[in-house]
Image (spheres, rainbow, N blue to C red):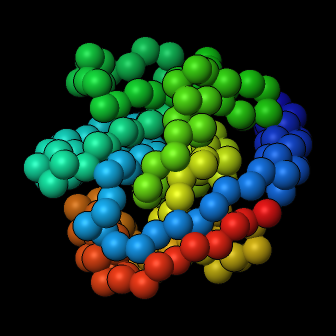
Amino acid sequence: MEILKKTRLKIGKAILSKKAARSKREILYSDFGKVKSIGIVWDASKRVEFASLSRFHQRMQEMKIDVKILGYFPGKNLPDQYTAIRYLTCIRKDEINSFYHPYSSEAKSFISKHFDILIDINFDKHFPLRYVTSLSNARFKVGLYESETKDSPFDMMMEIENPVDIDGYLEQVIRYLKMIKDQTRKTVD
């Protein structure tokens, strides 16, 4: 059974590579003061992090920045704390296909949205979230440093020691984004 899972994942990664190679998006970032929207992909199995995300959402709302969070929850039923929250949607295990690609309307909508910034909080590298991050039309993508940068979907990577504290990570992301002042514009093929 494990061999079948690994084979399906390998096929899923190959399909994603082809899709990512065909997709085009414009990298555009100039100043954090111009940011109007942030998308976050998050491992929703880590329920204790939800309070940190709620605080971050509140802080960004005070700055008039719209935040949408797409989580991946490996179970069938979402925890009560995730339901009825307008800025959070979750992909559940039964909303991914046999190659671990999410197919829900929420995932497709999130991928197609042109967020000013996408912040990847997928520290355990769940493939359904990697799929979303890789194909996202976000104008600027931020994630944890990866030594293999060839297939990295990120425009900016943060090198933070393990275990990664989500509050510290988000604080560092915003801090470094505020430091960038020059117009960054590039089309990625």
**Would you say residue 139 is visible in this rendering?**
yes
Residue at 29%, 18% (x, y): give it. Answer: 83
Q: Using residue 63 as the reference point, say whether residue 96 is left or right of it.
A: right
Q: Using residue 139 as the reference point, say whether residue 38 is left or right of it.
A: left
Residue at 83%, 57% (x, y): give it. Answer: 21
Residue 15: horizontal and vertical position, in percent?
86, 44
Q: In what quadrant of the picture does the N terminus appear?
A: top right
Residue 96: horizontal and vertical position, in percent?
67, 26
Residue at 33%, 59% (x, y): give it. Answer: 35
Q: Using residue 175 as the reference point, say whether residue 128 is left or right of it.
A: right
Residue 150: horizontal and vertical position, in percent?
76, 74
From the viewer's side, name the closer residue of 12 and 185.
185
The quadrant where residue 153 appears: bottom right
Furthest-left residue in this view: 62
Above-or-below relation of 85 to 131: above
Q: Give the number of callouts.
A: 0
Above-or-below relation of 155 to 87: below
Residue 161: horizontal and vertical position, in percent?
39, 78
Residue at 79%, 26% (x, y): give it. Answer: 98
Q: Using residue 127 as the reference point, say whether residue 9 is left or right of it.
A: right
Above-or-below relation of 159 to 97: below
The quadrant where residue 127 appears: top right
**Would you say residue 74 is visible in this rendering?**
no
